[in-house]
Amino acid sequence: MKFTLSWLKDHLDTDEPLEKLADKLTMIGLEVEHIEDKSKTFAPFTIARVVSAVQHPNADRLRVCMVDTGETSDKGEPAYIQVVCGAPNARDGLISVFAPPGTHIPGKNITLSVGTIRGVESRGMLCSAAELEISNDHDGIIELPADAPVGVGYAEWAGLGDPVIEINLTPNRQDCTGVHGIARDLSAADMGRFKDPTIKPVIGEFPCPVKVTVEDASLCPGFALRMVRGVKNGPSPEWLQKRLTSIGLRPINALVDITNFMTYDRARPLHVFDAKKVHGDLTIRRARDGETLKALDGRIYTLDPNVCVIADDKGVESLAGIMGGEETGCDETTTDVLIESALWSEINIAQTGRRLGINSDARYRFERGVDPAFMVPGLEMATQLVMKLCGGTPSENVVAGQALPEDRVIDFPLSEIKRLAAIDVSLVEVRRILGHLGFMVAGSGPVVKVAVPTWRTDVQGKADLVEEIVRIVGVDKVPMTPFDRGEAPRKPVLTPIQSRTRKARRALAARGMVEAVNWSFIARTQAELFGGGSSELALANPIASDLSDMRPSLLPGLVAIAQANADRGFADVALFEVGQIFRGDGPQDQFMAAAGLRRGIASSAGLGRHWSGSATVNALDAKADAFAVLAAAGAPVAALQIATSDESKNFPAWLHPGRSAAIQIGPHNVLGYFGELHPRVLDELKAEGPLLGFEVILDRIPEAKQKPTRAKPVLELPAFQPVSRDFAFIVDRAVKAADIVRAAQNVDRKLVSGVTVFDIYEGKGIDADKKSVAIAVRLQPRDRTFTDQEIDAVAGKIVAEVAKRTGGSLRG
Amino acid sequence: MSDLDALQSKILADIANASDEAALEAVRVAALGKKGSISALLSTLGKMSPDERKTEGAKINLAKDTVTRALAARREVLKALALDARLASETIDVTLPLRETPAEAGRIHPLSQVWDEVTTIFADMGFAVAEGPDIETDDYNFTRLNFPEGHPAREMHDTFYFNPKDDGSRLLLRTHTSPVQVRTMLSQQPPIRVICPGRTYRSDSDQTHTPMFHQVEGLVIDKSSHLGHLKWILHEFCKAFFEVDNVNMRFRPSFFPFTEPSLEVDIQCRCDKNEIRFGEGEDWLEILGCGMVHPNVLKLCGIDPEVYQGFAWGMGIDRIAMLKYGIADLRQLFEGDVRWLTHYGFKPLEIPTLAGGLSS
C-alpha cells in the first residue's frame, strides 16, 4: 500500500515530521517498508535560465550555454555559469533545470564533477526529465514556463517533493488499504486529528434507467449503481493526476481516475461503465462455460461458472470485483456513466483472481473484504467527484442486496489486557483508544461492551481488542518479565531419535566427512532408481521438474553433489547427510536416515594422494562409515549381521551386487545398506564412479533398555594372562571371513575372548581359486593358567570347526 | 718386567684395540676362556708349592681382575658406540607433511550446528523438543491454526501440494512447523513448553527464498504466561544465541492467523559486507514472528482459552545462522560445495554447550 505524505494530510491534521509518522506507523503494525523522499534527491536541482546558447567550437552537436542560476557575484551582478549541453532544445531564454557539480543524477546514476568537454569547461548540467527519473522523456532538457522562478528549487516548485510512503500491509487490515483508514490509526496513536467529514447523499434527479438483478447473493451480498448523465470526460485535474502519478498509477481520464482515487483514498474500489455501451439491464451472475471477456488489461479471459461476472443483454461486461471489460470502458467520448459500488464474496474473488492470474487493486481489496457500510456512501462520494470534475446530472441509486452486516458487540473484561499483555490500561484510556479507532465502548467495567466498526471484520473477540489496545499503547510498554523455568527436573529434552541424529552427524564428521543439506525433493527418475517415485509422493505443483518427488533415499542427492564437486575440480570427496526420507505419505512412512558417500581417494585417513597411502575407496570404507554411525547412534554392534545380495530379500538395485551388503538384526530388521553404487545407476544419474556409499535408517535401531542407574557394570579383570594363537586357513575364495571368525568364536565362547583377521593372501603359492585367511585367536584363562595340552586341544577344535563350517584347512 | 706383567699389558692393549663387541669377546676368550692365557697361568698354580702358590696366585688373580674390569669397561664403551652408530643410521624425514586428522577435516553443516545451539539454549530454559512429519494435512497446517478457507493469509504461504486423494483431500508439505504445535496440543495437556525445529517448504525461489528452509518454533501454554514473558524469553535467547551482552530488539504489532496479539521482532544491527554487529547501527533486521496463541487455535486443539493461555514464536534457522555466521547467500546452504561446507561448517568436536560457549 502506497501513499504520499500530503495525501495522508488530506485525512490527518498533523504537524508531526515524516520520520515520526513513519516510526509510529511501524510501531502500530503498519510496517513502513520504504520511504521515497524525492525532496532530498532533488534538493540540488534548481530552476535556471539559459542566457545564451552558442555552437561548441569543436563539436557539431554540442552547445556552450551560459546559465543564470540566480547566483550573484560579490558586486551583486548575475554570475552566469558555463555549461556544455548536448540537448537539441537548448536555446537562448529557455527556462530549465540545472544541477551543479557534486549532484547525483538519479537517471544516470552518476555524480557530476567539473569537466572539460572537447576543450570547453562545463560546470554543471541542464537536465532532461528522464535524468531526474520523473518521466521517460529524454528528447531534450526540461522546458519550464517562462514565469518559473529562477533560483528556486525545482522539486519544491513542481510539487515533486511529496514523500511516498509504502507500507507492508498485513492481510487482516482491510481498512488500511485506503489512506483514510491509515489516518484513523495514526490519530488513535496521537499523531494528529482525524478528518472524517460526513458524506452527504446526492439527490437523484431521475430514476436510474438500468435495472440490476443479483442471481447469487452469496457471491454478491450488495450492489449499488447510479447513472450520471451528460458528463464531459477528459483528463482529470492536476491535483488528481498528481495523486495517482505519485504512487505510480497512470492517469487515464477523469472518470477512471476517480475510481482509482477512491480505491486508494477510501479502500473503496468502484467501476464505471460507459452507459451507452451497456445493452439493457445488468445481471450479476456466474459466467457460463466458455464465455470470454476482453478485460481492461487488453487480455482475453475464458470464463467458467466459478467466475462471478456483471453481464448485460449482450454478454459479460466485467469480471466482478477484479477488472472491468474493455468494451464498456469509459473514454473521452463517454457522456453517460454508470457508477458501480458493490460487495463481493472474498473467497470467490481470491480464487478467481488466482486462477485468472489477475492482481488488480480491486482484487487486493475485495479479497481482504471492504467496509460493507461504505458501499452506498462510497457511491455518493464518487458521484460528487464525477459531478465536480465532469458535470452531469445524477440518477437515483439502485441498491440490491443487504449491505449492512450484523452488529458485532464483544463482552470485554478489562482484566483481559493484563492477562494477555501484562500492562495496566485504564478504562479512560481504553475508551480513548478504541473510540479513535471507531469502536463504541459501553459500560464502566469490569466487563464493558465494545461494538466493532463495520470496517474491522478482523476484530472478532477479546484477544483482538487486546491487540488493538496493545498496539496503540505500544508493545514497548509491555514489561519484559523473567520466565521461571519452574521446578521441573533437568532431564534430557531430546527424543531418542533426535539424540541419534545428533550423534550420527558428529560421528560421520569425525571420520573426516563433510555434511551436506540437500533438498527433500528430487527428480522423479532419481527417485525411481532408489525405490521411490510413487504417485503419492509426487508434488502436484513442483517448483522445477527436477524437484518433483519426495526423496526415498539421501543417496541421489549426495551423488549429485559429489559429481558437482568433481566437476569443480574436487574429485576426492567424502560427504554425508542426516535427514528425512519418505517411503509413503503418512507420518509413519517418514524416516530419519544417515547416508555417506566417498569418491576417489577418500578413505577415513584423508582425501587425495598422500605418501602414507593413496588407495581409492572400496566397499569396506563405506562399511566402516555405516558401522561408525550405527555404533554412535547406539545400535548393538555385536548383534549386527551382514547379508550379501544373494542372502538378503529385496536387495536394492542401486548397489553393485558383489560389492555391497545389507546390515540387519535378523532378516526382518534391515537397518541399512553399504557398498559400491551400481554402475548402471551412476550412468543414469550421469555421475562418474566408482562411488562408495551407505545409508542406514536411524529409526530402525532398537531402543536400548532404560537402566535404573547410571553406574556401569562391575569390571572383571581376570588374574591370568591371555594366550594368543595364530592360524592360517586355506579356503575357497568365496568363503566369507566372517564365517571363519564365527567358527573360531563358537568353539568356546567363554574361552575365546577375541578373534582377529590379520592377513588375507591370494596369489603365488596358493591355488588360483583359493585364498589364505590368517586369524589370531585370543584365549582367556579364567581360573588357572592353561597347560600346553589344553591350548593344543582348543586349537585342534578351532581347526576342526573352521574345516567343518568353511571347508578350510590349515596352511602348510 | 715379569712375564705376567707383559701378558697383562698385552691383553689390556688388545682390549683397548678391540673395535667391536665380537673382537672384545675374542680377547676375553683368549685371556679368560678355558684355554685362555690367564686361565692357563691359573692352572699352573696346582703344581706350585704353597708359598709360591700364595704369592703367584695373588698376582695372577690380580691380573685376572684387572683384565675383567677392563673388559667390562671396554664393553660399555663399545655398546655405546654401537648404539650411536645404529642411531646414526636410523633417520626418518620428520618434515613429511601429515594428513589432516579426520576430526579436523570433517564438518558439521552450519544449519545442524545452529540447530544444536538453539536446542541447547531452550533446553536450559526448560523446553522439550517436539517434531512432526514434513508431509501434513491441510487441517493441521492451516485449518486448526485459524487460517479460514480461502483467506488471503493462506496465500502468503506458497504451498506445495500433493495430488488429491480419492476422497478429495490432499496432503501438503508443511509451510511452517506450527502443525507440530497442533500435534503437541492435541496429544498433551498443559503446561506445555516445547520447541519445534524442522524442515519447512514454500514454493518460492529467488535470492532470499529457497523452496525448502528450516524453522524453529516455540510454544508455551499454561495458566499465566503472557506477552511480557514472551519478550523476555526472546530477548534472553537472542543474547545467548548471538553471544553478545545486549541485543536491541524491536517488537512490532503484526498479523498471523494463529496468534492474537501478533508481533514481529527486529534486531538492531550494523551490516558491513559480511560482518554483522549487534546492538549498534541503523538497521533493523526482522528475525522472527510471535504472539499470544489465538483463542480459536486453542479451541481447535482441545484447550479451553478461558482457562489456559500462552504464546508461540517462529524463526528461520537458516536466517539466524546466516546472521550469526556472516553467510551472505542463502542458496549456498543447499549447494553441497565442499569448499563452502569446509569454510562455513563446524568441526565435529566443536559441540555447543552453555558451559563452554556455543561457538567457542
Image: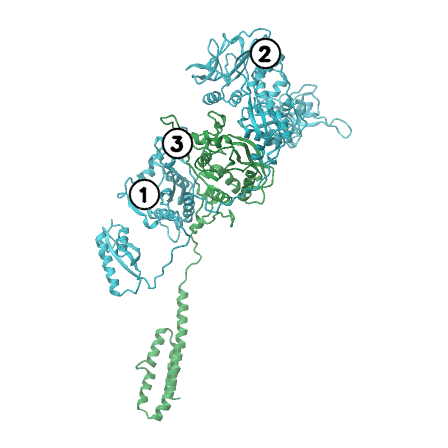
Chain colours: A cyan, B green
Quadrant hosting residue A61: top right
Closer to viewer: mark 3 or mark 1 = 1
Whether residue A648 is visible? yes
Residue topped by disc 3: A548
Residue type (three-letter) at the residue carrying disc 2: Asn
Mark 3 residue element: loop
Whether residues under marks 3 and 2 lie with C-beta atoms below 8 angstroms apart, the answer is no
Q: Which numbered dot is residue B198?
A: none
Closer-to-camera residue (B189/A470): B189
Callout 3 crowding tier (Cα within 10 Å): few <14, some 14–19, many ≥20 = many
Q: Chain of mark 3?
A: A
Residue highlighted by disc 2: A233
A218 vs B185: above or below: above
Report the mark closest to the observer, 2 or 1. 1
Please name whichever residue, A83 or A426, is drawn nearer the observer in this view of the structure.
A426
- Which secondary structure, mark 2? loop
Tell me the CA gap for discs 2 and 1.
81 Å
The chain carrying label 2 is A
Left or right relative to A401: residue A433: right
Q: Chain of mark 1?
A: A
Q: Which residue is mark 1?
A: A669
Percent position of residue A135, x then y: 59, 22
- Dot 2 or dot 1, earlier in sequence: 2
Disc on the earlier residue, 3 or 1 = 3
Contact, mark 3 vs mark 1 (Cβ under 8 Å): no
Q: Position of residue A624 (x, y in %)?
A: 35, 49
Q: Residue A180 or B50: which is nearer the viewer?
A: A180
Q: Residue at x 37, y 50 (%)?
A: A614
Labels 2 and 1 positioned on one and the same chain = yes
**Local crowd size for mark 2, using a 10 Å CA cut-off: few (<14), some (14–19), many (≥20):** many
